[in-house]
Image: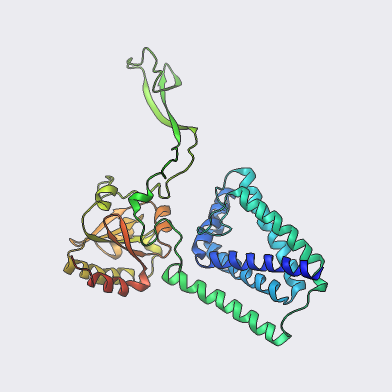
Amino acid sequence: MKIPLYIIRIIVGVLFIFSGLIKANDPMGLSYKMQEFFEVWGLQSLDSYTLVLAVVMNTFEIVAGVAVLVGWQIRIFSRLLLLLIIFFTFLTGYALFSGKIKTCGCFGDCIPLTPKESFIKDLVLLILIVVIFIKQNTVSPFLNRFAGSAFMTSAVLFCIVSQWYVLKHLPVIDCLAYKKGNNIIDKMKIPDGAVADSFAIKFRYKTAGKEVEFGSDNFPDDFNDSTYQFVDRVQELVRPGTATAAISDFILYGESGEDTTMAILNQQGYYVMLLSKDANEAETDWNKNAVDVSTVCVTKKIPFFIVTATTEAAEKQLPATENIHYLKCDATVIKTAGRVNPTYFIMKQANIIGKYANSDYEEVIRQLSNIKQ
């Protein structure tokens, strides 16, 4: 049984380390996924704790995987892993059978799994971890007590430092649709060969004290009668498509509320977008850094846009000028595009040439200085 048990330990350990490392590359993404679950369960009051929980969970996954591989404190970690996989199986099962969560975030945005795939994976892991739990007394540690403690401490420190780094400087590996090198307009298109969602439009009107509903192809004969009062326009999904665009909700609004998305993305030459989902929560020095960046933009004749969901709050910290223009965008879109608040995008038409956190604004200035128009 030693060889099969060792193989099981390798499978479980490697999977937990791999899963933890992928999510540790983007702890903010896991935080948002937790908030999605909390919203479904009506626990939005816990949203402010999700980032800490994400960092702790990622750290535990990696450390537990390492512990299983080297056989360190296997009695403790076999129990903890069993509790963790039972919890994960509940989450993926809830996502699958409730239909309220589209993806579970098991491997972050880098390897998106469907709820069914995630649930099956967790069931298999549950069986393997039960075997480790039952056979825990037969596992011998590879390292002595001192070396094992030092090794595991190093693993914990690595997890904490690496996650601090990506929270400050953006993920090392960007798996989002808004990563450097992508074209936003291209990502807004449905993949070739895919069928788009099919919708039916229905209208609700009130007439003779009653509310009636009808489609665009079966208006009532007396519709021109002035007694019909418009109530609502409803869009119903008739047939789901086979795929969706990677970016489906990126919309930029101008000062008067007009949709300026294509005008911005199709403009010639370079421009800079500074994305901040909430200026009240942005890093304290963002406005000073933005002034420095905008100064370089002026010398290079490069437009500079601040894209935020909180325009008024942002303008209080950095008023609009001839060189600094404001655009409004949904906060969910912004936090998906840029994990750090705020994040710089160096653009050329719809192409993302560079993507930098606020703490790396000097690199933004260096890149802009090297641009030859």
Residue 198: image location, x then y, percent: 45, 33
Residue drawn 77% across the image and 72% down it: 75
Q: Nearer the viewer, residue 42 or 139?
A: 139
**Residue projecting furthest to the top:** 221
| Position of 242 relative to 106 (above/below) | above
Q: Is residue 182 left or right of residue 130?
A: left
Q: Residue at x 68, y 86 (%)?
A: 147
| Whole-percent x, y for residue 274 in the image | 32, 62
Which residue sits furthest front?
A: 3
Across and down, in percent, residue 199 comes to: 44, 32
Residue lying furthest bottom in this view?
A: 146
* Figure coloring: rainbow
Quadrant where the N terminus lies? bottom right
Tell whether 273 sits left or right of 238. Answer: left
Q: Is residue 346 visible?
A: yes
Does 283 sit above or below residue 201? Answer: below
Q: Quadrant of residue 345?
A: bottom left
Q: Observer-nearest residue: 125 or 82?
A: 125
In the picture, which quadrant includes the C terminus?
A: bottom left
Vertical placement of 114 versus 2: above or below? above
Side of 285 where 146 appears, left or right: right
Q: Nearer the viewer, residue 60 or 108?
A: 108
Give how far across and how far down residue 197 sits, in percent. 45, 36
Q: Do we see residue 86 in this rendering?
A: no
**Label total for image:** 0
For residue 200, which quarter of the picture? top left
Is residue 293 left or right of 119 when viewed as pictured?
Answer: left
Q: Nearer the viewer, residue 342 or 64?
A: 64
